[in-house]
Image: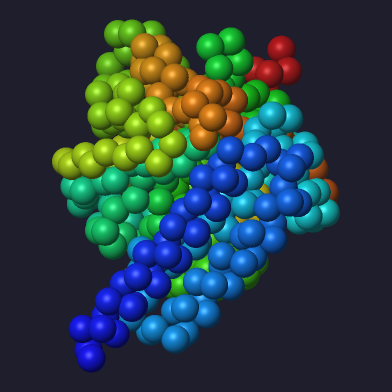
Amino acid sequence: MKALKELRFWRLERFLKKTVVSNNIYLTRCRQKTRAPFAGRFIFSIWLTFLFSKKNPKVSSEMKLFSILAVSQAAEWTYSDQGDSWKDVCSSGVRQSPINLQMVGAAQKSAGAWRFKNYDEEADWQVKNSGHSIVATTNTEMHMISDTFNDDANYKFHSWHIHWGSDTEPGSEHKMEDKQFDAEAHLVHWNTKYDNFDAALKMGDGLAVLGFFIEKDSENDVSADHDLDRIIKEDVNKNVQSMNANIHTQDKSLMNLFVNNVDTSQFFRYEGSLTTPTCDEAVIWTVFSNPIKIRQETYDKMIKMTNDKDENTVVKNFRNVQDVGDRTITFYTSLDSAASSIFGISTVFAFALLQLV
Ligand SMILES: [Zn+2]
């Protein structure tokens, strides 16, 4: 009797998996214009999955994943106009990102010390092609704390990814004094005062993203000899070409990939949003003013390293800058770095002056 029940369960699960998977493939082949006819099929498959999981609590997590995948793919979006046609909060929001960061009008504050917990752990990274970028995750638990966050917030690391341009155009998301850098890496974290990432996504201080500008440099630049350069040039290069392809790489820490490659005592801070749909206005942004250097050769590989769902090379995967509105932008600098620059002028302020001449 038990065996019969098991068999019935297995058959039902197989049928359901087939339905959801076929719808998933169907969706992938369709374009946005023809979304309406298959919306019903999706709702049906999602409803079927949850009805099934309610009756059979031991429904496999794989099944649920297929269902979630189907939903996420239903919300297709592209960088064809750098995000200008994205809907809902993306167009109606009041604290959207990215923005042009400028010293004029920015508040100035003193930066305290960063506390990066486990950022020096050499983690096992899974680097995956999301169809829009590469996204790196790990099981190693890491946290970020800074006096500059309200309420001594403790942010837990979630993932990192990169935005880039093309062989002729730069592709950072934020600009600094109207300058667009070649690329930009984002380290995404969520506030541990909320239950999980999804809950944090609904709150104004739910996420904290660290933004690192990336600038290509000459082949022989020793400052480009670091793990970020290596992970792109050696590990990722051509190995995650197709959407959802992934690799594992060890021996690299967040410190060596990002933090150690810039002066983290100088940065812009403002309240913004995710820079991809659904553009949730949940992000406390920190963008460091000093760029990470990578080799020209590595940048050339970066802009060819991933294809989208249609097997087209992903280039210019950045959103255009958004209105700052009445938001306050704050520039933080530590007393040490201010004292070390001539007459107390920080490097970014000197940069702003250079732009004027
Ligand atoms: Zn991003």
Task: Count all numbered tags in the image, as a single digit.
Answer: 0
The foreground one among 166 and 255 is: 166
Residue at 46% across / 54% down in the picture? 21
Q: Which residue lies furthest to the bottom in this view?
A: 1
Instruction: Classify 27 as above or below 51.
Output: above
Q: Can residue 300 be seen in this view?
A: yes
Q: Is residue 54 left or right of residue 33?
A: left
Quarter the N terminus occupies: bottom left
On the image, the x and y values in percent for residue 35 come to: 72, 47
- Residue 48 position by quadrant: bottom right
Figure check: 349 above or below 203: above
242 or 199, nearer to the observer: 242
Answer yes or no: is residue 339 visible. no
Q: Residue at x 58, y 31 (%)?
A: 317
The picture quadrant where one finds residue 99 is top right
| Position of the C terminus by quadrant | top right
Q: Give the percent coordinates (x, y) of residue 33.
A: 76, 40
Side of 136 where 109 appears, left or right: right
Task: Tell me what residue is drawn at x 44 percent, y 79 percent.
Answer: 53
Residue at 47 percent of width and 78 percent of height = 52
Q: Position of residue 170 (x, y in %)?
A: 58, 20
Answer with left or right where residue 265 lies relative to residue 327. Answer: left
Q: Please tell me whether residue 97 is drawn above or below residue 179 in the rendered image.
A: below
Quarter holding residue 168? top right
Residue 57 lies, with reference to residue 356, above or below; the image says: below
